[in-house]
Amino acid sequence: MKLARVIGTVVSTIKHPAFARLTLLYCEVLAPDGRPDGQRIIAADRVQAGVGDTVLILDEGTGARQIMGVTTGPVRALVVGIVDQVELAQPA
Amino acid sequence: MCLRHPPGAVEHVAAAPIALLCAGARPLTLPAMYLGRVIGTCVATIKYEGLKGYRLLIVETVDDEGRVTGEAHVAVDVTQAGPGDTVFLVGSREAAQACEPSFVPVDAAVVGIVDAVDVPRDQP
């Protein structure tokens, strides 16, 4: 799973049916110390996250389909948690 | 499926034979789901059976402001997107799930045409 910050939303009308009624969030992936690592990805929202939230992204297709209760569908990244706090034993 | 293209050579790349697209290919690491822009189409007459009937697009990865962030590559299209469209893609194994049947050799699929990416500029 990845730590990320939601920086925006992606609006799409024409899309694969697997994405129907899913909110797509535009996220920047974070290092554990909270700094962006440069990668920006899209993830479908399952926890009502919003812009500015630090979130937990599940980046695995089988797990994502299991959560959505489907057996097929090209969905891979899901936002599955809103992070309150990350504590590092030795601050970077 | 990977290709490198110099800026301004889009027309040339789009018209290139598929052998050129594969020449000099190096491992392409694609994020799970990402933004891209269609810069061309790719025609392959001889291809694996499961790929028949699917359009192949040449896509470059972009960010929310349209800046190119990665290499151009070939992706299967299930949305009837065309050159110039901003799209979102699924990479790696899940890309094959966009196709029917899903046991096809695909590592990137265009799964949606993007109308807008809304990124508030006054974020902390």
Image: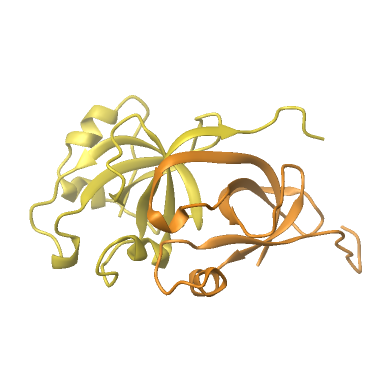
The chain that appears yellow in the image is B
The chain that appears orange in the image is A
Residue A22 x %, y %: 54, 53
In the image as oriented, which residue stretches furthest toward the left?
Answer: B45
Q: Quadrant of the N terminus of chain B?
A: bottom left
Residue A56 falls left or right of residue B56: right
Residue B72 x %, y %: 37, 42
In the image as oriented, which residue stretches furthest toward the top?
Answer: B8
**Is residue B118 positioned above or below A65 on the image?**
above
Q: Is residue B49 visible?
A: yes
Residue B101: name its quadrant. bottom left
Q: Residue at x 50, y 70 (%)?
A: A65
Who is closer to the viewer here, B119 or B41?
B119
Residue B41 falls left or right of residue B33: left
**Is residue B8 positioned above or below B75 on the image?**
above
Residue B23 falls left or right of residue B96: left
Who is closer to the viewer here, B99 or B109?
B99
**Is residue A58 positioned above or below B10 on the image?**
below
- The count of marks equals 0
Residue B94 x %, y %: 41, 65
Q: Residue at x 51, y 31 (%)?
A: B67
Q: Is residue B28 visible?
A: no
Residue B80 x %, y %: 27, 42
Q: Residue at x 80, y 52 (%)?
A: A34
Q: Residue at x 13, y 51 (%)?
A: B44
